[in-house]
Image: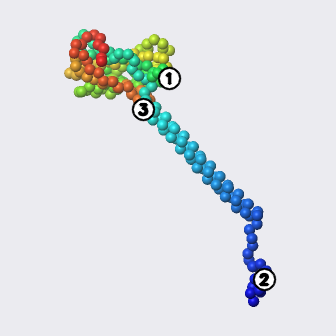
Amino acid sequence: MLKHMTRGPLKGQRGITGLETAIILIAFVVVASVFAYTVLSAGIFSSEKGREAIGSGIGTTTSAMSITGKIIAKDTDGDKDVDEIVFTIASVLGQESNIDLAVTTDTNGDGLLSDEANKVHTTVISYFDRDYTIADITWTKQGLGKNDGDDILEAGEKFQITVDLTALPTTNQLVAYDSFTIELKPPAGAPIVFSKTIPAVTSAVMTLN
């Protein structure tokens, strides 16, 4: 009886041919290739986004310009209070900053640019002291030395900035021993901020240390 049961191949079963094996292997390779490409593409995309984020972070935390030379306070009318703060800016290490220094005209002469109807400036200067804050104060510029005559701070150029303190009320004039802070905020990049104290003896022109 045992001899009868093991005679011949079992019905309903067949072996795997070489062609079928090759098809299965090819399918595995294709799936693995697609998966590897997806992972690689995702990695490249993530790296690119990371590089962009780092570049953007550097751009917003570093300034493309700096103050060069002295910071000057001027008493233009001889009444023993400061009427103007003057300083010079240049591009950092001669780099191309492309900072727009277009100036809005203070048409009503109140020392404020915030109330002007036709604003063209994108660089904003703010004034702070212990008692008073002016978010968008009047300022003007003058090109010094090599300059192509436009409003853009470019490599190798310098601009003298004059901050007009007309907006300060008569009860809060900047006088001897007073301290103040000026913040220059360009359209992009970190602002320039400096704080100074008026010397004990005021004169027409004072160098601030």
Which colour scheme appears in the figure?
rainbow
- Residue 129 horizontal/vertical position (percent): 26, 25
Q: Quadrant of residue 160?
A: top left
Q: Furthest-left residue in view?
A: 171
**Are the residues flagged by discs 2 and 3 in contact, CB closer than 8 Å?**
no
Q: Residues within 10 Å of mark 1 (few under 14, many from 20)?
A: some
- Residue 55 horizontal/vertical position (percent): 49, 34
Who's the residue at 46% across and 33% down the image? Answer: 58
Relative depth, front residue between 104 and 208 = 208
SS at badge 1: loop
First of labels 1, 2 by sequence position: 2
Residue under numbered circle 3: 61
Question: What type is the residue that disc 2 sits on?
Answer: Arg
Residue under numbered circle 1: 96
Question: What type is the residue that disc 1 sits on?
Answer: Glu
Q: Is residue 150 left or right of residue 107?
A: right
Which quadrant holds the N terminus? bottom right
Q: Is residue 89 above or below residue 63?
A: above
Q: Furthest-front residue in view?
A: 3
Q: Which mark is residue 7?
A: 2
First of labels 2, 3 by sequence position: 2
Question: Is residue 102 shown to the viewer in this render?
Answer: no
Task: Kindly report which numbered mark, 1 or 2, lies closer to the viewer in this rendering.
Answer: 2
